[in-house]
């Protein structure tokens, strides 16, 4: 035994330092793992740069001085024209403040209604048994396959007959209940134990009371995800407000930004400055609900 140990020690001493390091299985695995991690981070950095490049380009264009819009450099020259944001806000042919108010009212009311209606529908599909439930649920899901361009004309005719042209409700009502929202909430609420709801019924709680006092607090992450998505969709919606709103005072921000593009020229620095102003509320909302957003997506995806 002593001879074997002496031989191994001698052989180890004769090997070069680098050879000893890479002949150790544990160190080789660690080195390979570190190399894979470095390669993964490098790929992620490249993808992140590619994804953020349009946003960076938009910021650079928004800060270019008037007359330098055709400059292709990422860093604006000869100076950073922060006054473009003020010019975009006070542009003579636009009512940017009114557009912001219109978008805020439409997005906020649509989000509140979507959370309530989709939450109730998702609760019914998740926790109640009734005839035709499966068929009705798949019919709701099938509506996700129908593009808006196909339903656009029937929706416009309905809105016109209801007298909702140039009205907030003409944009809000068609987008309150959605198949995606019902599906998202149903998937999450299925994880709530039925025994908890039964215990509440035994204690005398009504069905609406169970929904408000038990189901809604437990479904916070899913409802937050739905609220974020709905607000962003309604805030950035262009086609439906364009159909419904004919008066300039009722325009939303996505429509108002096009006022900076005339028949003969486009003031791209103002277009990009107005676009940056318009995305501030959605970015702030996402940052505020980011924790709930990630948790809601993760928990819903596990069902």
Image (cartoon, grey):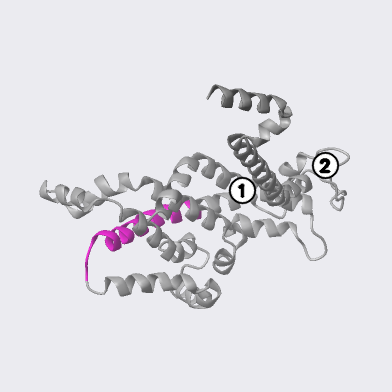
Residue at (44% x, 62% y) in the render:
180
Task: Relative to 84, say whether 102 is above or below.
Answer: below
Could you say where residue 263 lies in the image, as x and y percent from the top left? 79, 66
Q: Nearer the viewer, residue 82 or 162?
A: 82
Q: Is residue 182 left or right of residue 272?
A: left
**Residue drawn at point x = 48 percent, y = 50 percent:** 228
Q: Residue at x 23, y 62 (%)?
A: 128
- Which element carries disc 2, helix, strand or loop? loop
Quarter of the image for residue 132 reads: bottom left
The number of numbered discs placed on residues in the rendered structure image is 2
In-front residue for pair 66/61: 61
- Residue holding disc 2: 75
Foreground pick, 4 / 210 = 4
Callout 1: few (<14), some (14-19), or many (20+) C-alpha neighbours within 10 Å?
Answer: some
Dominant secondary structure of the magenta stretch? helix
Q: Residue at x 37, y 74 (%)?
A: 139
Task: Kindly state the secondary structure of the residue where label 1 is placed.
Answer: helix
The span picked out in magenta is: 106-130
Q: Alpha carbon of mark 1 to alpha carbon of mark 2: how far? A: 21 Å
On whether residue 40 falls in the magenta region, the answer is no
Relative horizontal placement of residue 103, taking residue 60 as reference (left or right)? left
Residue 282 as seen in the image, left or right of residue 207: right
Q: Nearer the viewer, mark 1 or mark 2?
A: 2
User: Which residue was labeled with disc 1?
Assistant: 279
First in residue order: circle 1 vs circle 2 = 2
Percent of width and height locating residue 25: 59, 37
């Amino acid at each position: 035994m002593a001879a074997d140990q002496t031989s191994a020690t001698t052989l180890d001493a004769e090997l070069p330092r680098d050879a000893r390091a890479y002949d150790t299985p544990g160190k080789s695995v660690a080195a390979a793992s570190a190399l894979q991690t470095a390669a993964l981070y490098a790929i992620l950095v490249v993808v992140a740069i590619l994804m953020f490049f349009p946003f960076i380009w938009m910021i650079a264009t928004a800060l270019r001085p008037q007359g330098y819009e055709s400059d292709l450099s990422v860093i604006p020259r000869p100076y950073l024209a922060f006054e473009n944001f003020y010019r975009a806000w006070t542009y003579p042919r636009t009512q940017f403040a009114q557009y912001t108010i219109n978008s805020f009212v439409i997005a906020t009311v649509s989000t509140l209604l979507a959370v309530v209606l989709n939450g109730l529908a998702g609760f019914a599909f998740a926790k109640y048994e009734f005839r035709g439930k499966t068929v009705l649920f798949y019919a709701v899901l099938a509506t996700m396959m129908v593009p808006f361009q196909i339903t656009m004309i029937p929706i416009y005719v309905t809105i016109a007959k209801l007298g909702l042209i140039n009205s907030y409700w003409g944009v809000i009502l068609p987008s309150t209940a959605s198949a995606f929202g019902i599906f998202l909430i149903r998937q999450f609420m299925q994880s709530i134990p039925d025994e908890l709801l039964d215990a509440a019924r035994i204690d005398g709680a009504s069905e609406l009371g169970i929904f408000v006092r038990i189901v809604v607090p437990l479904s916070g992450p899913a409802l937050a995800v739905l609220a974020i998505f709905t607000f962003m969709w309604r805030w950035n919606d262009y086609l439906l407000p364009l159909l419904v709103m004919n008066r300039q005072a009722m325009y939303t921000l996505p429509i108002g930004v096009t006022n900076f593009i005339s028949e003969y020229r486009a003031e791209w620095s103002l277009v990009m400055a107005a676009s940056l102003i318009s995305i501030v509320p959605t970015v702030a909302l996402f940052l505020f609900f980011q924790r709930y957003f990630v948790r809601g997506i993760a928990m819903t995806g596990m069902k």
